[in-house]
Image (cartoon, helix red, strand yellow):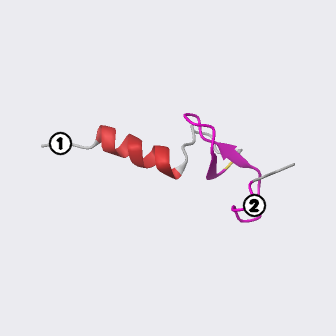
Amino acid sequence: MDDRTDLPEGPPYADCVQCGEPTEYPVARPVATLCPVCEWQEAQRTACSG
């Protein structure tokens, strides 16, 4: 049973490569996918601190 009822209908969504949560991106996306939370955390890690 698919418990991703909070996502809009559409193509199968890829799982986040870090935490496994569903992303907003289709499975066929050619790059590694991150969920919104992991995307934000990654941006914080790579942001310029100066």
Among the 4 quarters of the image, the one containing residue 33: top right
Q: Residue 5 has which mark?
A: 2
Magenta stretch, overall SS: loop
Q: Which residue is mark 1?
A: 49
Q: Position of residue 5 (x, y in %)?
A: 75, 60
Q: Closest to the observer: 33 or 19?
A: 19
Q: Which residue is situated farthest in the left direction here?
A: 50
For the magenta stretch, what is the residue range? 4-25
**Dot 1 lies on which element?**
loop
Binning the other alpha carbons within 10 Å of mark 1 as few (below 14), some (14 to 19) or many (20 upward) gives: few
Kindly check if marks 2 and 1 are in contact, taking CB atoms under 8 A apart as contact.
no
Residue 30 relative to residue 34: left or right: right
Q: Position of residue 34 (x, y in %)?
A: 54, 43
Mark 2 and mark 1 lie on one chain; the one further toward the N terminus is 2
Among the 4 quarters of the image, the one containing residue 45: top left
* Residue sitting at x 27%, y 43%: 47
Q: Which residue is situated farthest in the right direction here?
A: 1
User: Please, what is the three-letter code of the amino acid marked with disc 2?
Assistant: Thr
Residue 15 relative to residue 1: left or right: left
* Vertical relation: 36 (above or below) 21: below
* Vertical relation: 5 (above or below) 29: below
Magenta-drawn stretch contains 21: yes
Q: Which residue is situated farthest in the bottom direction here?
A: 8
Q: Nearer the viewer, mark 2 or mark 1?
A: 2
